[in-house]
Image (tube, rainbow, N blue to C red):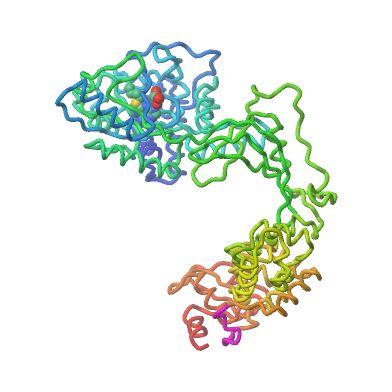
Amino acid sequence: MNRADAAQRTAELREAIRHHDYAYYVEARPEVADVEYDALVQELRDLEQTFPELVTPDSPTQRVAGQPVDAFRPVEHKVAMLSLDNATTPEHLREFEARLSRARPGAEFRYVCEPKIDGLGVALLYRQGRFVRGATRGDGRVGEEITQNLRTIRSLPMTLRGRLAAVPEVEVRGEVFMPRAEFEKLNRSLEEAGETTFANPRNAAAGAVRQKDPATTARRPLDIFLYHVSEARELGFTTYGETLEALREAGFKVNPRTEPCPTLDAVVAYCERLEAERDALGYDADGAVIKVDALEQQWRLGSTMHHPRWAIAFKFAARQATTVVQSIDVHVGKTGTLTPVAKLEPVELAGVTIRNVSLHNEDEIRRKDIRIGDTVLIERAGDVIPYVVQVVAAKRPPGSEAFTFPERCPVCKHTAVRIPGEAYWRCPNSACPAQLKERLRHFGSRRAMDIEHLGEAVIEQLVERRLVGNFADLYRLTVGDLVELERLAEKSAHNLVAAIEGSKHRGLAPLLNALGIRMVGERVAGVLANHFGSLARLQEASVTELTEIRGIGEEIAESVRKFFDDESNAEVIRQLATAGLTMSQPGFQADAPRPLAGQTFVLTGTLQSLTRDAARELIERLGGRVTSSVSRKTSYVVVGEAAGSKADDARRLGVAILDEPRLLELLQRR
Ligand code: IVH
């Protein structure tokens, strides 16, 4: 290829790659498969290698290029990068509008609202539509040049389109951030490598942007939303909305949650809605930014030294706070799991006072090196249970010691055990009163046997006075026993006895949940109840039989088997049955015809009239089993379209083959 052809082809390739980058990184609507895209990039690389003089700084191949730097050069911003004034309540927003009206009497204001990204503000310079320089905010007047690192952000266009493409020099601003999913991935890999993790996506993004080697930045995927064009009025724009349109047209990513709000009521509604939905954004937003839409009004309102008068940030409730670990207690769970819990100096977080936080297990404490007396950063995001993000190392009191996990159960003093490969220490003593109390509490809880009046104080006394040593003992309690308890009036005793009596017929699923079998919660209990219909049948099921049920893995199966193999559990179940508890699933027809009992099916290929799950369900309802691999014992292999090797296996082993019509016939005939 001659040089002229090569120049032509590189231009074509660059255009194609830019187009696909935009489709993939900005619009999230890829148009080609990865291999096709990779082939384009490879072809461009090869050409640029043969004709090095054709390489340009804005070539897609140059995103991860450039030499590591020792220090970042200072950059003076053309226009100072100001901060934002804050509002934390709707009233503050109304005061903001009142201030606007005082400054521009008689004017009407329309607004544009958008998420306030918790990232890093950057200023980007484009000359004749080409990216030439990027800088951090710094102190607002002077920042640091991070051009090479910003080039690694794939959603950032290196060349512009539309109206901004022809502008001799334009400065645009936006927020660099790390998407939450990338942040979690990064922290996981840092953790695996034994390196310090980042406390939040913002710190991770800041770390990535300030990497001395752009190759490292490239491995920490960042993204950017643009929200500002400096000197937009001079470029002929009249509203902020129009400016955003031009940014979008130029190929920049503009936040899709940006909305015009014609009134302050609409602004307040926007802020409330965004705060309620913040967890679904995929990135951290710490508030909303409200901007006056008309650029003429912005210009007339002007700025203070600190912030523009035409914009305000509505801050969401904080989700991170620091507090002090007063002690670390160990809690005994219903299966003997020992869970360390930090008692905290109470702290208000997103509207709730936090006093305790689970530290999960020994390894977690060791990994985060959490000590008594430490100041810790805690977080409570959405519905997530509060947790310790990290220790504030600078605030560690002198002379503190690493936490050592107790060797004994804090309640019964039995030696604790930690099975190799397991994360938790356990109290192996099944008679441990702490475990018994937890088991009883769970047994009576709403989603289990739902025994009203069986509160913690009552359980405490029942166990301490040895009135109850297992679940079955509950059903032997009399009013006479209960009135002996402290603070239990006769009426309450009657109520409790009645509530216990009333719990006898909850059915199999709640009972299975109530028994506190390890790894069997509400969902698994439901699956088992539906499959077996009665406790007696479940008790006979082998591990193999259990693992063949959808949703039941090996670990659950073994835990179930182990529970029923334990003689004392079997004894309690006998006693519960004698007490008259319902031990079957209401509506389950144990005697329903099970014509496919004893037959096993393997499904392969695509069926036309029903999904594989539906086919499985129909077969199971008739008593058949569906397994995944073909053996001589398989009764039928059901072969759909594009069936693979399993059909061959069937032929080789001489197993009967059913096509779809014959399967349907078989299912219907029964
Ligand atoms: S507008 C002159 N819009 O928040 C306009 N800022 O606390 C000022 N930020 O320094 C910025 N998301 O780094 C604006 N949608 C958004 C923003 C945003 C995040 C940052 C920005 C600014 C800081 C002010």
| Residue 574 relative to residue 311: left or right | right
User: Residue 181's x, y, as percent?
Assistant: 51, 41
Q: Nearer the viewer, residue 643 or 114?
A: 114
| Residue 623 relative to residue 30: left or right | right
Q: How many marks?
A: 0
The verdict on residue 1 being magenta is no
User: Residue 191's x, y, as percent?
Assistant: 65, 36
Q: Nearer the viewer, residue 307 or 142?
A: 307
Task: Decide whether the magenta segment is chiefly helix, strand or loop.
Answer: loop
The verdict on residue 588 being magenta is yes
Residue found at x 37% / y 26%:
86
User: Residue 354's x, y, as percent?
Assistant: 57, 39
Q: Is residue 8 above or below residue 621?
A: above
Q: Quadrant of the N terminus?
A: top left
Residue 7 is at least partly visible in this image: no
Q: Is residue 425 above or below residue 305?
A: below
Q: Nearer the viewer, residue 387 or 353?
A: 353
Q: Which residues are magenta?
A: 586-596
Q: Nearer the viewer, residue 12 or 111?
A: 111
- Picture quadrant of residue 78: top left
